[in-house]
Structures are given as structure tokens and as C-alpha cells.
Amino acid sequence: MDNPANSNACGRFAPSPTGPLHLGSLVTAMASYLDIKSDNGRLWLRIEDSDSQRSKANFIGLIKQQLIDHGIIWDTWPNPDNKKEGVIYQSERRRIYSYFMHFLISTERTFLCSCTRKSLLKQGDLTEYLKSGEIKYPQICRNRKSGNLSHEKALRFKSTDGDDFVIRRLTTGDFSYAFTVVVDDYLQGVTKIVRGDDLKFTINRNRQIQAILGFPFPKILHVPVVRDSNGKKLSKADKHSKLRGGEFIKKQIIESWTHLRENMPVSWIEKVTPTYETFFN
Ligand SMILES: [Zn+2]
């Protein structure tokens, strides 16, 4: 394999520590790894723990171990204190997000929203919510002249397609995934993103923020998410999708490859196969 230093390709795997990896997230991690390594690039590991309510510290070590066990070795991100195993944590980057948020605010493409989840569920499209888990924002506060700051719940982005998504939740101070990934992908020089096709709907969100902040658009490759026999996406709560250790690891690697072989150019896998042969020996 060529020296990765000769390639500018950068990818990332960015799990949220709301549970251990499952077969579905292993497939995405494997696809990200194979894709970027076939370009002789580097893969960053980013822990997306910006949701302070749902993220649990104890899953972070477990996720790292699961990746290593399955042969997915990330490249070292140069953290200044050198104590973070080459990984970045979104929970430690609020000041960075805040800096870019203030730039967004200065472009007048944001507004304060006082709607609660409950009030949005009442007014939003419930069928769409049940389908995707997303509530399409009914634009209630977009053109509001003034408000009471203590009642504001979120800072939203004025989207060109009416999908006014959240930038920051003011109740917790957490920044949204739609915003943090764009900032981190830029700062980490990510050139290609590999992710599940269930996230396709976020492309327009990402692109709009990238355009305003003057960031380049990374290429995006969607891999079909793993579904159960009823066509339902595997989730962390699903018992059958749980990853196991020991003798099951090899089977799980093969399972993830099998899923990808059907949907990815075989050359990606062939190019990096030696890594796995070494791993199995
Ligand atoms: Zn609102």
C-alpha cells in the first residue's frame, strides 16, 4: 500500500455513544474504512457526544474496542495534549461550534424559536414524524419580530427549502448534529463521507451551512443501511443486531463485508484485503 502521507483523502467514522456499535453501525464503519484506505487516505474517529442527555461515557471505550476487534484502526488525530488516543470528542468543542454559530448569526440566516417538542408535534406532520422520527418545522417563529429570551428553546437555521432545522438547543446548550458535523468535517479536512442512506435527507442541511461558511463540499457516499427481514432498520435496541466478541468477531466481519460486497465496488475491498488477512492470522 502506498504511503498514506501521499494522499489528501480523509474520511471519518463518527459514532454517537448512545449504545455500543451494532451490525448496522459496523457496516458503516467498515465501509468508511475500506473506502478511504483504498484511496490511501486517513480515517478519523470522532465521538459525536454533543447530545449531553443521550451520550454515555461508558460506551466510548466499548465502541473503540469493538472497532479495534473488527480490524478498523483509525488514524491519529493530533490532539494538542496527546492524551486522547487520536480521537476528537464533540463534547469538548463547544467553543469552536460557538465561534461558527456566531458567524452564522451574523449572516441573518438564523432565528430564535420558542416552540417545544410537544407544541411542534401538535402542529407538525405526524405521518412524516412517524416515518422518519423528524418533525418538519412549521415555521412558526421564523418571522417573529420579538420574543422573550427566557422562553426561547432553540436557534434554528432559515433553510431555503423550508426545513428550518436546529443549530443549537438553548435549553441544554447542545449543538445539533446537522451543524457540528459540518464544522468538524471542515476542520478535520474530510474529503469523503461514507454513511448510511437513512441520512440522505440531511444533505441539503449540510450543503447550506457549508455554502454560507465557505467550506468545501466533501463527497458523500451512502451505503444501504442494514435491515431486518421485515425491512426495518437495525437499531441499538434490536437484540439480533448486537455485536459479540471472541469467536463471533470473524463472522461479523464477514457479515459486514457480505452486506457491502453487494453494494460497493469490489475493488475497494480487494485493495485493502491484506490488512484483514494479517488480522485473521
Ligand atoms: Zn418555533
Image: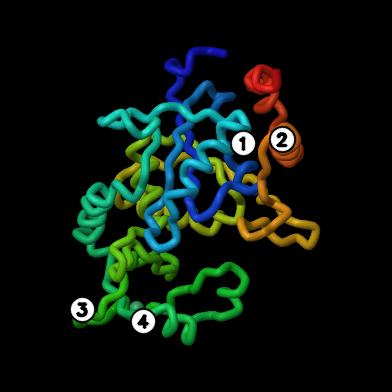
Residue shown at 30% from the left, 79% from the top: 114
Q: Amino acid at mark 1?
A: Met
- The span from disc 1 to disc 3 (Cα, nearest Å) is 45 Å
Q: Amino acid at mark 2?
A: Trp
- The span from disc 1 to disc 2 (Cα, nearest Å) is 8 Å
- Between circles 4 and 3, the one closer to the viewer is 3
Residue marked by disc 2: 257
State whether label 4 is within 8 Å of ligand 1. Answer: yes
Q: Residues within 10 Å of mark 2 (few under 14, many from 20)?
A: many
Residue marked by disc 4: 140
Residue shown at 47% from the left, 18% from the top: 4
Going by the image, does 77 lie left or right of 122? left
Quarter of the C terminus within the rendering = top right
- The span from disc 2 to disc 3 (Cα, nearest Å) is 51 Å
Residue marked by disc 1: 30
Q: Residues within 10 Å of mark 1 (few under 14, many from 20)?
A: many
Residue marked by disc 3: 150
Label drawn at residue 142: none
